[in-house]
Image (cartoon, grey):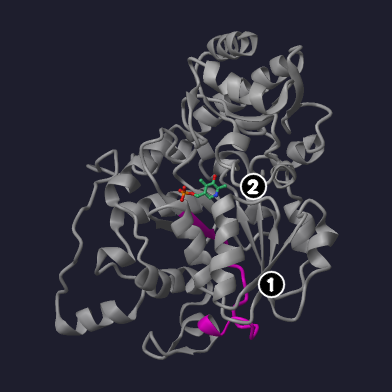
Amino acid sequence: MPLGFDTQLVRVRANGANQPLSEPIVLATTYSAPSAVRHREMFQDGSTTFYRRFGNPTAAAAARLIADLEGAEEGILFGSGMGAISTSLFAILRAGDHVIASREIFAQTRALLDTTLRGYGVETEFVDARVASEVTSRIRPNTRLIYVETPSNPLLHIVDIAAIASALKPGIELYVDATFGSPALQSPIHLGATLSIHSATKFLGGHGNSMAGLIVDGGKFNWGNGKFPTLSEPCPSYHGMKIWETFGDMAYAIACRVLSLRDLGPALSPMNAFLILTGCETLPLRMERHCTNALTVAKWLKAHPKVAWVNYAGLEGDASYGLHKTYCPKGAGSIFTFGVKGGYEAGKALVNSVKLFSHLANIGDTRSLIIHPASTTHRQLESEQRAAAGAGDDVVRLSIGIESVEDIIADLDQALGA
Ligand SMILES: *Cc1c(COP(=O)(O)O)cnc(C)c1O
């Protein structure tokens, strides 16, 4: 019987004889070759570590662990979540390609697709990905991929991954940024996604001390369908090799390493890989506590006279409640939004009055975090644009930590009273 999820996370290294129980941190940037012939092969075979920008044993151990947890072919770690996201796109897109992306995605991913990649001739259309037909009806002959984020930021909407995946014409990829749920709460690849992406800076590391990003590749995609010449045609910058023909199910991961990491360079530091591995050991425990704390706080806020509304997929009656029960049965995560009566000024005042919560623009820390998006992350938008992005004037976003829930509630209570 395969080991359970929680067991794998702590036991992956622990069962060999004379093994160090935690992964060694390999800092070397370069590796010597036993012979000139072997050195030539190391440049050619794509899978060997010879220079740290292309791979590192500590990072590889972390990537392998998470890929195994998701039942995937390969994991590739990067220096940040955006490093993973930009690599995932630059690896396969070319001028003239079309992308369909969810309207509710991380602001910097949106900027990358909407501005940077548009400048390189890649066109992205943004849709309401909660409605599968909204996505599939936009498919054109040059559509290469569909990019969604679920649960979404900051509205926590859940995308019906299986509905979109089953409606896909063959040959279009489905990428899922699954940062908000982490591998402990959902597994997009089992639902039909080509690959899942995580900002490991958030829950995987979990302690707000390491930055990393991850692509987990299901390894089931047919790259030989004619739409992805980077992988199927001879690659001029890689020995004229046909990457798909040579590497099969590993082709995408190899292309990320030997082409995109080579060109873009967002390699992960081995120290951070070690911190991510250490964080992973307690991921299921932390997520359990994050989820129960968040649900308790959401219920408490919903009954509070100064709170106008609470938007948490784990609350019965929430628009995403049904999908959340199917896709994240272990809990709806720790991040949610609510509205304070009194709008912009009341939202700002609340954030000014908290004492336990940390006031900052991050999520997925062990500590409870708070932000008023309208006066910070979304301040450059017009009022209507903010509202459409789920960051209206009265919106407060919380990322609930693993502290004693009584202390979290007491802090919100005194701040709402202030
Ligand atoms: C934080 C975040 C990212 C970017 O990750 P970094 O590690 O900050 O580069 C991408 N997607 C989501 C959903 C995030 O929350």
In magenta segment, residue 224: yes
Image location of residue 316, percent across then percent down? 81, 26
Residue at the disc numbered 1? 172
Number of numbered labels in the structure image: 2
Please name the amino acid that badge 1 sits on.
Answer: Ile
Asked if residue 391 shows in the view, the reply is yes
- Between 293 and 339, which is closer to the camera in this rendering? 339
Image location of residue 132, percent across then percent down? 81, 57
Q: Residue at x 76, y 12 (%)?
A: 305
Reply above or below: 314 against 349.
Answer: below
Please name the amino acid that badge 2 sits on.
Answer: Leu
Image location of residue 381, percent across then percent down? 64, 47
Rendering quarter of residue 296: top right
Residue at disc 2, CB closer than 8 Å to ligand 1: no
406 to the left or right of 238: right
How far apart marks 2 and 1 lie (CA) works out to 33 Å
Nearer to us: label 2 or label 1 = 2
Reply above or below: 418 against 206.
Answer: above
Rendering quarter of residue 259: bottom left
Which is more N-terminal, label 1 or label 2? 1
Determine whether the residue tagged by mark 1 lies in a helix, strand or loop: loop
* Crowding at mark 2 (Cα within 10 Å: few <14, some 14-19, many 20+): some
44 to the left or right of 155: left
Quarter that holds the C terminus = top right
Image: magenta residue range: 214-230
Q: Residue at x 55, y 37 (%)?
A: 376
